[in-house]
Image (cartoon, helix red, strand yellow):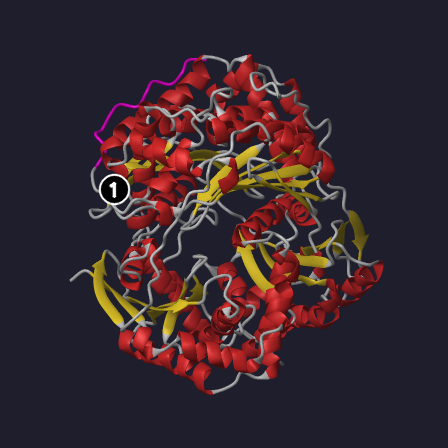
Amino acid sequence: MPDRKHMPSLRLPERVRAPRPQRIILPNGLPLYCINQGQLEVARLDLVFRGGRWTEQKPLVATGVAGLLMEGTHRHSAAWIAEQTDFYGSSLGASFSMDSVEVSLFGLTRHYAHLLPIMMEVVCAAAFPKEELQSFIAYHQARLLIDLEQIDVVAFRVLTEKIFGTHHPYGYNSTPEAYAQLTQEDLLQYVHHHFHAANAYAVLSGRFHLKLIDHVCEQLAQLPSQIAQHPPQIDPPPAPTGVYQHVYMPHTSQTAIYLGRRLWPRHHPDFPAFYILVTLLGGFFGSRLIKRIREKLGYTYNIYAEMETMAHDGYLLIATETATERAAETLSEIFAAIRRLQLEPPDEEELRMLRSYLLGNLLAQLDGPFNQADYVRTHLTEQAPLDMVERIIHTLHHIKPHTLQELACKWLDPQVLTVITVGPKKIPHRKKPKPYAY
Amino acid sequence: MIPFEATTLHNGLRVIAHRDPGTPLVAVEVLYRVGSRDDPPQRTGLAHLFEHLMFGGSAHASNFDDALQLAGGENNAFTNADATNYYNTLPACNLEIALWLESDRMCCLKLDEATLRIQQQVVIEEFKETTYGEPYGDAWHHLLALAWKHHPYRWPTIGQSPAHIAAISLEDIRAFYDRYYHPANAVLVIAGNVNPHHALVQAEKWFGELPARPMPLRQLPVENPQGPRKAEVHGNVKVEALFLAWHAPARTHPDYHAAELISDLLDNGPSARLYRRLMRERKLASHIDCYLSSHIGPSLFVIEGRPAKGVSLVQLELAIREEIARLCEELPSMRELTKVQNKAEANLLFGEIQVLHKALNLAFFEMLGDAAMIQTEHLKYRQVQRHDIQRVAQQMCSPEREIVLYYLPQQ
């Protein structure tokens, strides 16, 4: 008969090690990071070009480059590229982030010999046909029309615009007009300035023979080695000041509540401890916001707090969609949760659960070669140290409850939180809570 | 290959254990053979609401999530028409904690009025978020109601309406728990860095003493689709959309894999027919999607499309019908068939990367009849011949049995 009354004894992972990829510098200067793990003969190659929105000459160019990279080269049509990659059961695609444009190949290692040359052709000789650009623009204009009917999309757009500014690379929003202004020349220029070895790195992950590394190196060596360009001068975002704004959308069944403020990049000294604090506030199912606003009050299906970081900046986001008739109470509850963090340190029992959860969660985040590759890319692109996870764990083991309280006072001042609500009814205007004196 | 050991406990619980030495984690999945097809017709959404109540604590573990998080674990659950899945991942050394929690809520779940009321509110907000808050979010409500007149697949898992969810009583909940939540109606999968033999012993320790209860009898109406069905609905959207559907073979039917390859030929990857021709070449669509619904039997074969600017819904519908006609009239080339077979095989392999996916897949195939089916799944795609594609397309996509939904902006 098992003893059901007591939880079986538990152990926590003693060590979570940051990935330590093997680094190879190619003759053209390109660093290649290799993570050779796993049991299946499957591999992913990510080629990351730094820049993204940060170095665009005009809005949406990085989006356009990623969106149209697979639409044909000077030698082959989009249909040919698509058929070849599909035939081998693989995927080849491009994506963009605030700080990069990335080209990724994912497939069985035994097909890499066929696929690598296609990937390199796309990178080195993308044509961006005018006709494809026109359909890209039409598609995204239509898509935008649909997306803007969603309260969460609208709230997110207004919030990030308020935090970083309408013209800031991290703050601007896509518009039908901005899409219409994209030209083939813009995309070719962007590639010319960004797609070279001095501005890139590659990550090969999965299970592969050493011969594959040679083959990958050989192909990546084709990338021109130009000197990296000077980054542009970007005006800093406005100083954080709390703004309340309601966006009226008459026909929605819920109200979106989005709060945020500007923070800093991942390499900021407060990052590890604040990561822990934000997790406590709204980063998991045992968090304060979930336990109270969902599980105690039933006001929402989901509510979360998270920290978003980029290479040059970062922000805090607290978000939920809630019953409109409960929106005012939900907002008060969010402020109350923040205030509680500022007024009293978390107790040991809560910290114990947070510690265990985060240890397991970080272990899972690094499980397997592809998760490790994601971690490595995030940290390389954001120019954060690769051992960050070990720093978080060190902080997790040693942090004092009052340190979390101090951090809450330092970075969660209600006076500088921007609050955006979107829905059919304005939330009754209320005075902001007084800042906590410290 | 996903090697595993399996056993059936004396109370009827099926247990499957798979070792993956490459991960520090273990995934523990419990599948209950109950889904929204078991909802009472006036209380749709019950199976899904019940899933939420499974986190309300049990006799010996007052809070499921707190205990699992203390063990460094994460968990979640999902319900569909046929099954409800509860899954946990945690450091492998803490396997027993997940087994303690899962066995305790299988036998001794706490059910009270207060938790029910709160979760009804949460689920109604979920309903609003996913059904009204997403463009075309209620299209499935309309499509399923067109496709089935008697079968309980006619409502979606979230439920027919918030009113149905609000009407569910604690008595409904208790009866549902007694009927469906017990060992013989469940599959337990343990996959991860554990010795499979040890895992089976642990499963016996925690689940073996639970009392056996009879398997629920389920009498689902057999509904032979008849006559084309068509409806026009209006919603809060800016762009009109088309949903074209046919009844498709059940998951265990010999033609199922051919049907899936047909949906891949039409819309899996950037070289697929509908995407390439209708979106890229003829520029008739701004969105196109084709898939088999997740119902295990019978499922729905669905094509969704939104016309490009300046194109009418009728023009897009005609173009989609031309592609369907081509499938029925011309054999696909050997190269195209091989392409979708290669993709299906690669996707099966990619599903073996994460230990949690392996656990979910093993449970799914066990629910279908035998977890070992997972080992031969790739062969079933390989065995499909060019003429099977044509034959199944002809049988499935018959004009007499088509279901057409026009989703239009409000006037």
The residue closer to the viewer here, B157 or A233, is B157
In this rendering, the answer to whether B116 lies above or below A108 is above
What amino acid type should be assigned to the residue bearing mark 1? His
Disc count in the image? 1
Where residue B315 appears, as percent x and y from the top left, is 30, 79
What is the x, y in percent for residue A392? 64, 29
Image point 63% across, 72% down: which residue?
B382
Camera-nearest residue between A360 and A317: A360
Q: Around disc 1, counting alpha carbons within 10 Å, would you say few (fewer than 14), some (14 to 19), or many (20 or more)? A: some
Quadrant of residue B16 in the image?
Answer: top right
Q: Would you identify the image quadrant in which residue A26 lies?
A: bottom right
State the residue at coordinates (60%, 28%). Answer: B206
Say whether residue A428 is magenta: yes
Q: Is residue A263 above or below residue A51?
A: above
The one of B392 and A106 positioned closer to us in this rendering:
B392
Which residue is label 1 attached to?
Answer: B164
Q: Which residue is drawn at 59% across and 76% down?
A: A83
Q: Main SS of the magenta segment? A: loop
User: Which region shows up in magenta?
Assistant: A426-438
Does residue B382 appear in this view? Answer: yes
Which quadrant of the structure image shows residue A105?
bottom right
Asked if A287 appears above or below A238 in the picture, the reply is above
Q: Is residue A21 found left or right of A246 in the rendered image?
A: right
Q: Is residue A25 left or right of residue A393?
A: right
Is residue B361 highlighted in magenta? Answer: no
> Is residue A194 visible in the rendered structure shown here?
no
Identify the residue at horizontal 80%, vertical 48% (top origin).
Answer: A22
